[in-house]
Amino acid sequence: MRFGIAGAGFSGAVIARELAEAGHEAVVFETREHVAGNCHTERDPETGVMIHRYGPHIFHTDNERVWEYVNRFGVMMPYNHRVRTTVGGRTYLLPVNLLTINQLFGTALRPDEARAFIADQADSSIEEPQNFEEQALKFMGRRLYDAFFHGYTRKQWGLSPTEIPASVLKRLPLRFSYEDSYFNHPHQAIPRDGYTAIVEGILDHPGIEVRLSTPYTPEDREEYDHSIWSGQLDAWFDHEHGPLRYRTLDFEEIRATGDYLGCSVMNFGDVDVPYTRIAEHKHFAPWEEHEGTVCFREYSRLAEPGDIPYYPIRMANDKTLLSQYVEAARAEQDVTFVGRLGTYRYLDMDVTIGEALTAADGILEAIEESQPIPSLFVEA
Ligand code: UDP
């Protein structure tokens, strides 16, 4: 079969590869002049630092299939992500751990003591947290929440934390040890040659043709047996029910010599500091050495038409709109919706790759059994 695939990020690339390896033909269309979507990396010509053009991407997973998959296409260098945060003129360690707690409260508690202390701070009257704030108050209490989560979350989402789903906080652990690794997963790494080289490797197959700077439109579907859409779900339907909302990011560059931050990511929790965080990209490649340094301040705002979509907002009204598009997607034939934009979800890279592999399995199975190919393989 001949597939038209919209988008050369991880979703489109992995599906193209799996289909091509099974003997099908894939034409991958990419609006931008590079592959890898928002994971794109490129060397800064002045300093030689590998820049994560659309913000920091740290690969972490507990999915063995995904881990083996990325290792097929590039050298993954061990990397342990650590984040610090500055609030009220002081610097603390994230995710919230025993040192963070002891520093904030001026205590020297051991794990069991800290657990009891935080349980005492927590709001036990909240049974089923309905939003981000309730989730935080239930698990850590007002003081930790106010210090590390309230301001940052307001800036990141542009909304009161009472309007944000509880699931967003569940991304972050609360630790009663001095372990300050940001992620819990057994595999954590950054590709030596960048994410773009990995995606180029995935796309490097005789059954795959890549067309850069070439958008795919729903009209193009006529030329293919089946389409894979990793663009914005609502864009496929010409936004007919209204636009699904996203947060976008603006980056402000800082150049210096030596070490500007002393770490890869510093968050800023104060609401009156207009940016959410600064990332110093050479620290994402600690095996390299560079004299110069490049950092980016990150400012988050509501995406306007034409802005790059980053984080799907998924508040109650967005979800109502989403359900209309999901219904329309389910009714479609000869197109499958995949990925962060195609399913309007906040996805880490490993989940994106894992879902792309599952979708490709499902597509190949449907072909084998002469069944129609499903338009969605996940609950959007
Ligand atoms: N968060 C926060 N304070 C921090 C870091 C994160 O309140 O210092 C909240 C914020 O709402 C954010 C969410 O936790 O959107 C998830 O954080 P994560 O670091 O996973 O965000 P990402 O790196 O994906 O932007």
Image: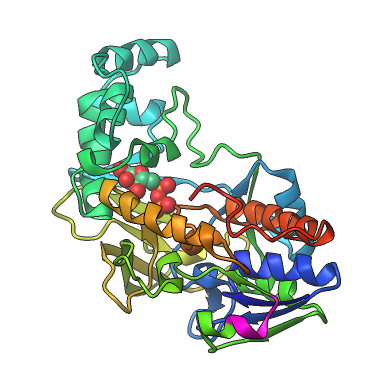
* Residue shown at the point (60%, 66%) measured from the top left: 333
Pick the residue in front: 291 or 269: 269
Res 57 seen here: no
* Most frequent secondary structure within the magenta stretch: helix
Image height check: is 137 above or below 29? above
Image height check: is 255 above or below 141? below
Res 98 seen here: yes
Please state the horizontal and vertical placement of residue 293, each as a whole percent of the image. 44, 71
Asked whether 224 falls inside the magenta stretch, the response is yes
Pick the residue in front: 51 or 213: 213
Please state the horizontal and vertical placement of residue 64, each as a whole percent of the image. 74, 44
Q: Quadrant of the N terminus?
A: bottom right
Pick the residue in front: 94 or 365: 365
Image height check: is 256 above or below 134? below
Asked whether 363 falls inside the magenta stretch, the response is no
Residue 227 figure quarter: bottom right
* Residue shown at the point (86%, 72%) measured from the top left: 23
* Residue shown at the point (50%, 63%) measured from the top left: 342
- In screen coordinates, is 192 left or right of 149? right
The part of the chain drawn in magenta is 221-225
- In screen coordinates, is 50 left or right of 238? right
Pick the residue in front: 238 or 296: 238
Please state the horizontal and vertical placement of residue 145, each as a whole percent of the image. 25, 32
Query: How is the rendered protein coloured?
Result: rainbow
Image height check: is 91 above or below 348? above
Please state the horizontal and vertical placement of residue 318, each as a whole percent of the image. 30, 53
